[in-house]
Amino acid sequence: MRLDGYSPRSWPAKSVIGRLSEPQRRDLLDLGVRREFAAGRVLIQQGDSGTHVFVLVEGHAKVVHESDSGRTILLAVRSRGDLVGELAGMDDSARMARVVAVGAIAARLLTFDEFSGFLGRHPGAYRVISGSVAAKLRSATDKIVDFSSLEVPTRLARALLRILDDHGSPVDGGMSIGIPLTQPELAAVVGASEPAVHKALAELRKDGVISVGYRNYVVRDLPGLRRFADLPPKLPPSP
């Protein structure tokens, strides 16, 4: 495995780096410096005034928010090809969340000036990154709507579908959600208690919709998961 951003593997199609043109991608990955972080290392501290944007080139990072009551909320998981900290770089604001390495990761660290210069050179890249920020806002809005109107099993199924859509990878007999999550972390994603999420997972397992391993979830029946999520069947693409 190469951790320098130039792995022969293709970039995830939905990631920011995957959506850039080759010249834009090369320019961005040539900026800044490469850093590696061990599992559990904090890349960004909530409330800090930021100085860098992180381009993830390997691994996964958790984005978590500490509420005033002391509750830890898992907001998102970012992976290879994603940007972290770009919002503070675009509006000069304090960091809204803490970002922690899930496993060993590598990233390019760009100063805000380098990042701003890149956007100035590549208007097309600015549109891609603005679209990514908008997608994050839509995802946050969807979660607020789900939390306020849906029961835990439905929220859990929808959360698994979102993670699968962003990070899923094919495995024997199904699709892995693609990122390692503990049940407490999954409960934080769903905004529910651990016992409620454990009960919902047991129901999904009983119906053969998912299988659960150590920090790993494999979707065995995608239409079944969509039914649990109270969503219509996903139609095949038009020819």
Image (tube, rainbow, N blue to C red):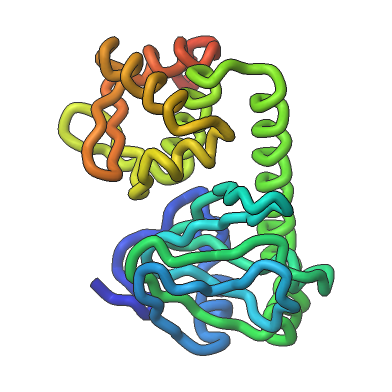
Q: Residue furthest left?
A: 172
Q: Residue at x 35, y 75 (%)?
A: 38
Asked if residue 4 is positioned above or below residue 73 in the image, the reply reads: below
Q: Is residue 230 visible?
A: yes
Q: Residue at x 34, y 49 (%)?
A: 180
User: Which percent across, then down, holds residue 93?
Assistant: 81, 70
Residue sitting nearer the eye, 193 or 96:
193
* Image-based side of 92 in relation to 1, left or right: right
* Image-based side of 107 in relation to 73, left or right: left
Q: Residue at x 38, y 71 (%)?
A: 105
Residue 177 is drawn in which quadrant? top left
User: Which percent across, then down, holds residue 194?
Assistant: 44, 33
User: Which percent across, then down, holds residue 78?
Assistant: 50, 56
How many labels were placed on the picture?
0
Residue sitting nearer the eye, 142 or 83:
142
Q: Residue furthest front?
A: 69
Q: Is residue 75 visible?
A: no
- Viewport quadrant of the N terminus: bottom left
Q: Residue at x 74, y 86 (%)?
A: 113
Q: Residue furthest bottom?
A: 33
Asked if residue 119 is positioned above or below residue 87 in the image, the reply reads: below
Residue sitting nearer the eye, 203 or 31:
203
User: Which percent across, then down, holds residue 67?
Assistant: 69, 52
Residue sitting nearer the eye, 223 or 145:
145
